[in-house]
């Protein structure tokens, strides 16, 4: 009880001391708040309370007034009212207000120290009693620019609220020049409209596919704007925000602390603060405001939340630090020091990557892709089973992302790009299509397929390191294995021509027969020695007529020729016909036989570009198309022009359609495609081949939005897969092992021979005709022989068998060259045979000598 009483007495003593001993030392500070300065109000109360309780010098009081934000006259009246108070105002602290300039000039005029805590435009005006705790405008703009530069944003949007905000951005706007001629450094500048609904502006930014946003607005507006950005899907993993508004409360606290400390410093010295009332309509000035302001400017702060404090002659704060804080990680990532205008990065790239991976692991990563074998195809489901999510697809891309996800540790889901395209800039719609479009519209965090890394795409999205290297090449049909036509010699004339010619041959022969019977010239004396023969003879029976016409058309001629004028006329015309027909036949036959060799062949792009028979094309909207469109090389330019001019269009929707067009029976179409895809196609499609070498070298990569912080984690994963041989295994799996059709490795296609000679097969038909003709001749000979035997047997009264024996024996006796009109027949078979043997022996010797003699020309 005694102790409690003792304590109460001490407390009373302490309070009495405060009131009675220090009452005369009370100092009033003027505070000009605006609407929404609640946090500063809290800072004011707590600071003054702390000062009054623990510091034993001045007792601080505050005169807090609300200042009009719109009416300068009203604001100046409020300030003058405050300065008029009997107790006098030691200094005024003014928070942000559009009427700031008038307040500043009143205080400066009456030499009342006026402390500001908000941005003011660069000033060179000598303001002895006015100073600002907010960083000097130009230095601040410079700091912001350095920070933006360090963030390495290729492009960004500046959203500002007031015109002053735009002045703060002046140095950032100059960054537009730091990468000239690059689409990357686009800076979009947008002003927040009046009111609280900024959705349309945010939608515009979203459509411009911009991820990086610099937001310069009042602190109290930040949260509502971010909330609306979230509704527009502008607060995803890829969106970066730089909030430039500094916390005014911190500056207010620093200002208040500095002010009260300075008053305490001067207390009980000759410069002690004794504020006097000021009437705005009189010329009385603050007694020691000028000295006090000068002291404050020079004084080193004991504690300052906003870093070092130094003012120039104009009251601008020229020393300060800016900390860049990653709000998600709650980490300071960089510091800017005004003293030496330098930015120091605190976060290493490792930290950034670590944070990015952590963020990636928290979400279900959307992977944009497109159907195209072997990269991605629909998985065949067991009957009646409906597949969902990733189970719907399979392929190289799926496996690759699965491997990467296993290493990094994220979950993912595949989605197909709606327009099924790879990604190109659509001039009409003014947007990117396909997978690239999906990334830009933030529909996906990753995009994978046979997506080529190109300069144009690299301008708008990031690519991982390549997982496959390739080049553009030509896919074309192998030469077809043609059926060899034995009767190719018939090809020069059509069937009808052959039929007409044969018919004509018969008709002409018959006509010739009748003409020669009619023309007297062809009736000849059979015995030239008999000048007055009783009978005349005509050799032009139908047999001879047929023989003559056949000899002519075969270009062989004939031993007997007509003598009559009309028959000669008829034969001449037939010769003329035969001449033209045989010449035409010969010429046409030569053309037919060389036709195959005349088929155009291509051995590369150069050859392709120089011919028009084989059409060629590319996939529409792909990098291969862009390669030809943008090439400066004359051959490729020519090819591009040809492609554009060819009708029907040579551009195909996808590789599959291109391959089918190449395979089409009479297509004559070459498809310019990427070599890895060609490799895949020719593995099982044995009628196709790759022509020539690659026209360029490029690679496929996993695409992701620009400046994706997880890019390096993905790169590392791909490198790991490459080093472990996993990428090779995946390629083998999808290019060879998973193929249903047999490989073409052992498939043998007869390559077209380049040699000039004809193979036996080509002329086989001629041999055949000869064979058949000779066989018919032999059969006819046998028939004639047997017929003759019959005649002999009748004439000579022999049995058919005896006559046959005699004639056969004679026919086989090649030494006998003369034949008796009547055959020699033995009386009895044995004697006859004996006798005839002798006769034959004799005749054999005789005939041999005769032939030898005629050969040696001894016998004439
Ligand atoms: N891979 C290509 C692309 O990414 C498609 C092509 O042109 O063959 O566009």
Image (spheres, grey):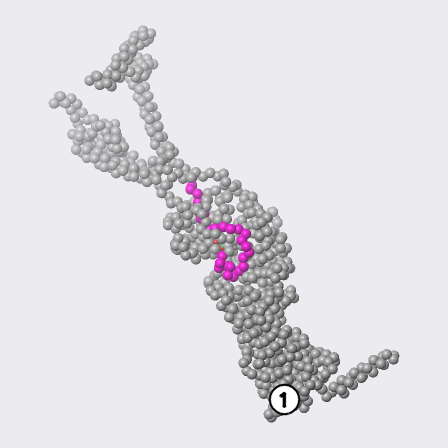
Furthest-left residue in this view: 531
Q: Is residue 182 left or right of residue 392?
A: left
Q: Quadrant of the N terminus?
A: bottom right
Which residue: 72% across, 88% down? 24
Q: Quadrant of the C terminus?
A: top left
Residue bearing mark 1: 286
Report x, y in % for residue 721.
59, 50
Q: Secondary structure at mark 1?
A: loop
Q: Is residue 389 visible?
A: no
Q: Is residue 713 left or right of residue 561?
A: right
Report x, y in % for residue 289.
63, 86
Which residue: 74% across, 82% down? 56
- Bounds of the magenta segment: 454-481
Q: Is residue 461 magenta?
A: yes
Q: Is residue 299 visible?
A: yes
Foreground pick, 568 / 444? 444
Foreground pick, 550 / 135? 135
Which residue: 80% across, 82% down? 11
Q: Is residue 230 left or right of residue 618?
A: right
Q: Is residue 655 magenta?
A: no
Q: Is residue 712 left or right of residue 678?
A: right
Which residue: 17% across, 23% down? 526
Foreground pick, 723 / 266? 266
| Dot 1 alpha-carbon crowd within 10 angstroms: few under 14, some 14 to 19, many 20 or more | many
Question: Residue 601, located in which quarter of the rendered image?
Answer: top left
Is 391 situated above or below 853?
Answer: below
Report x, y in % for residue 33.
64, 81
Question: Residue 249, located in which quarter of the rendered image?
Answer: bottom right
Is 85 situated above or below 410?
Answer: below
């Amino acid at each position: 009880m005694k102790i409690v009483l003792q304590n109460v007495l001490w407390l009373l003593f302490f309070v009495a001391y405060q009131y009675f001993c220090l009452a005369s030392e009370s100092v009033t500070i003027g505070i000009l708040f605006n609407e929404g300065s609640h946090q500063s109000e809290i800072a004011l109360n707590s600071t003054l309370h702390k000062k009054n309780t623990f510091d034993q010098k001045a007792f601080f009081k505050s005169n807090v007034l609300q200042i009009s934000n719109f009416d300068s006259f009203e604001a100046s009246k409020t300030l003058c009212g405050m300065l008029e108070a009997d107790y006098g105002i030691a200094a005024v602290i003014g928070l942000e207000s559009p009427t700031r300039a008038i307040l500043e000039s009143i205080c400066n005029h009456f030499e009342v120290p006026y402390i500001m805590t908000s941005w003011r435009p660069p000033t060179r005006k000598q303001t002895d009693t006015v100073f600002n705790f907010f960083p000097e405008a130009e230095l601040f703009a410079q700091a912001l620019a350095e920070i933006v530069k360090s963030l390495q944003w290729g492009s960004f949007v500046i959203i500002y609220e007031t015109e002053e905000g735009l002045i703060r951005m002046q140095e950032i706007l100059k960054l537009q020049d730091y990468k000239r001629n690059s689409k990357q450094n686009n800076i979009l500048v947008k002003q927040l409209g009046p009111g609280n609904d900024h959705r349309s502006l945010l939608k515009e930014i979203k459509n411009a596919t911009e991820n990086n946003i610099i937001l310069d607005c009042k602190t109290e507006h930040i949260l509502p704007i971010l909330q609306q950005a979230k509704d527009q899907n502008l607060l995803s993993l890829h969106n970066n925000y730089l909030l430039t508004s500094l916390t005014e409360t911190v500056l207010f606290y620093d200002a208040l602390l500095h002010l009260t400390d300075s008053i305490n410093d001067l207390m009980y010295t000759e410069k002690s603060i004794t504020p006097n009332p000021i009437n705005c309509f009189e010329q009385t000035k603050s007694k020691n405001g000028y000295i006090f302001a000068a002291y404050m400017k020079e004084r080193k702060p004991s504690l300052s939340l906003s870093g070092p404090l130094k003012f120039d002659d104009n009251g601008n704060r020229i020393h300060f630090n800016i900390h860049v804080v990653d709000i998600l990680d709650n980490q300071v990532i960089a510091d800017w020091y005004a003293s030496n205008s330098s930015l120091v990065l605190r976060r290493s790239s490792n930290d950034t990557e670590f944070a990015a991976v952590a963020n990636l692991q928290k979400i279900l990563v959307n992977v944009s892709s497109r159907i195209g074998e072997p990269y991605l195809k629909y998985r065949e489901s067991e009957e009646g089973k409906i597949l969902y999510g990733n189970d719907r697809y399979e392929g190289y891309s799926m496996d690759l992302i699965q491997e990467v996800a296993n290493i990094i540790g994220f979950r993912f889901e595949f989605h197909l790009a709606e327009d099924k395209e790879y990604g190109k800039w659509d001039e009409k719609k003014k947007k990117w299509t396909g997978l690239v479009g999906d990334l830009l519209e933030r529909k996906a965090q990753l995009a994978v397929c046979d997506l080529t890394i190109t300069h144009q795409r690299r301008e708008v999205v990031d690519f991982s390191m390549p997982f496959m290297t390739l080049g553009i090449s030509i896919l074309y049909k192998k030469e077809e294995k043609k059926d060899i036509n034995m009767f190719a010699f018939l090809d020069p004339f059509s069937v009808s021509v052959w039929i007409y010619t044969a018919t004509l041959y018969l008709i002409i022969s018959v006509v010739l027969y009748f003409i020669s019977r009619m023309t007297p010239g062809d009736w000849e004396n059979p015995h030239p020695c008999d000048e007055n023969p009783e009978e005349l003879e005509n050799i032009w029976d139908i047999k001879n007529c047929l023989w003559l016409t056949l000899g002519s058309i075969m270009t062989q001629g004939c031993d007997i020729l007509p003598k009559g004028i009309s028959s000669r006329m008829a034969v001449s015309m037939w010769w003329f016909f035969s001449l033209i027909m045989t010449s035409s036949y010969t010429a046409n036959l030569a053309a037919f036989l060389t036709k195959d060799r005349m088929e155009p062949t291509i051995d590369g792009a150069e050859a392709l570009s120089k011919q028009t028979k084989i059409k060629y094309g590319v996939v529409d909207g792909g990098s291969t198309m862009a390669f030809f469109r943008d090439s400066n090389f004359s051959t490729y330019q020519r090819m591009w022009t040809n492609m554009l001019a060819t009708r029907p269009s040579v551009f195909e929707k996808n590789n599959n359609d291109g391959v089918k067009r190449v395979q089409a029976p009479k297509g004559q179409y070459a498809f310019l495609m990427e070599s890895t895809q060609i490799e895949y196609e020719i593995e099982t499609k044995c009628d196709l081949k790759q022509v020539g070498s690659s026209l360029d070298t490029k690679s496929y990569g996993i695409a992701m939005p620009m400046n994706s912080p997880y890019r390096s984690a993905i790169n590392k994963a791909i490198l790991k897969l490459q080093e472990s041989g996993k990428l090779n295994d995946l390629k083998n799996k999808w290019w060879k092992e998973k193929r249903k059709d047999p490989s073409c490795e052992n498939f043998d296609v007869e390559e077209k021979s380049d040699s000039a000679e004809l193979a036996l097969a080509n002329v086989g038909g001629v041999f055949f005709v000869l064979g058949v003709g000779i066989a018919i001749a032999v059969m006819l000979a046998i028939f004639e022989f047997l017929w003759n035997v019959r005649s002999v047997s009748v004439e000579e009264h022999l049995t058919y068998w005896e006559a046959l024996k005699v004639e056969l024996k004679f026919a086989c006796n090649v030494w006998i060259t003369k034949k008796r009109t009547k055959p020699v027949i033995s009386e009895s078979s044995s004697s006859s045979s004996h006798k005839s043997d002798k006769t034959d022996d004799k005749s054999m010797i005789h005939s041999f000598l005769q032939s030898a003699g005629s050969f040696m020309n001894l016998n004439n």
